[in-house]
Amino acid sequence: MSPIDAVVVGLSVALIAGELWFFLGPRRVSSVRPSRTMPQEIKVLVKGGYEPDTITVEAGRPVRLLFYRDETAECSARVIFESLGIEKELPAFQTTAVDFNPEKPGDYPFHCGLSVLHGRVVAQVGSEGARANLGKGHAKHG
């Protein structure tokens, strides 16, 4: 084996070892915990109802509901949270944010302007409430 062959074989072995380490080696796991001031963001599709219609969150942390109204029906033109004193217009084919902070555990119901469509936010103690919404909502908007 010539010296050039030995160098090529050595570099090949080093590159293969590097690839194996990169793809199969240990991974760092991010342990970023959500801040108590970071809003819990949930997407809600408005189309003949609310999807999801029951939203579980962590009590004492801010909530941002992103309502995407995918229709022009007059009934869904606004969303009302009577117990929180919130009433928001929901323009058709747009996303509207509704922000609030459920300080205490409990139900926070909401409905459309004609009280035909109904949903609720359930505030629970601890972070398990926020985890209940993982994968829920819709992909209509970003």
Image (cartoon, rainbow, N blue to C red):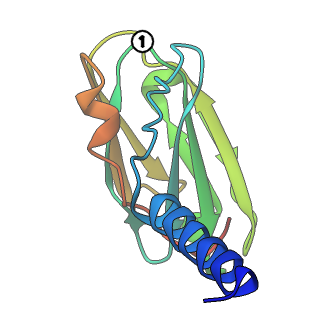
The residue sitting at 62% across, 54% down in the picture is 78
In the image, 29 versus 112, the foreground residue is 29
The residue sitting at 50% across, 23% down in the picture is 84
Relative height, residue 53 to residue 58 (above, below): below
Q: Is residue 37 left or right of residue 126?
A: right
The residue sitting at 61% across, 72% down in the picture is 10
Position of residue 21 measured from the top left corner of the image (x, y, whole percent): 47, 59
Position of residue 4 measured from the top left corner of the image (x, y, whole percent): 75, 84
**Helix, strand or loop status at disc 1:** loop
Q: Residues within 10 Å of mark 1 (few under 14, many from 20)?
A: some
Relative height, residue 89 to residue 13 (above, below): above
Position of residue 25 measured from the top left corner of the image (x, y, whole percent): 41, 54
The residue sitting at 24% across, 16% down in the picture is 125
Please give the residue where the numbered disc 1 appears in the rendered image.
Answer: 60
In the image, 34 versus 14, the foreground residue is 14
User: What is the three-letter code of the residue carrying label 1?
Assistant: Gly
Position of residue 123 measured from the top left corner of the image (x, y, whole percent): 30, 26
Q: Quadrant of residue 72?
A: bottom right
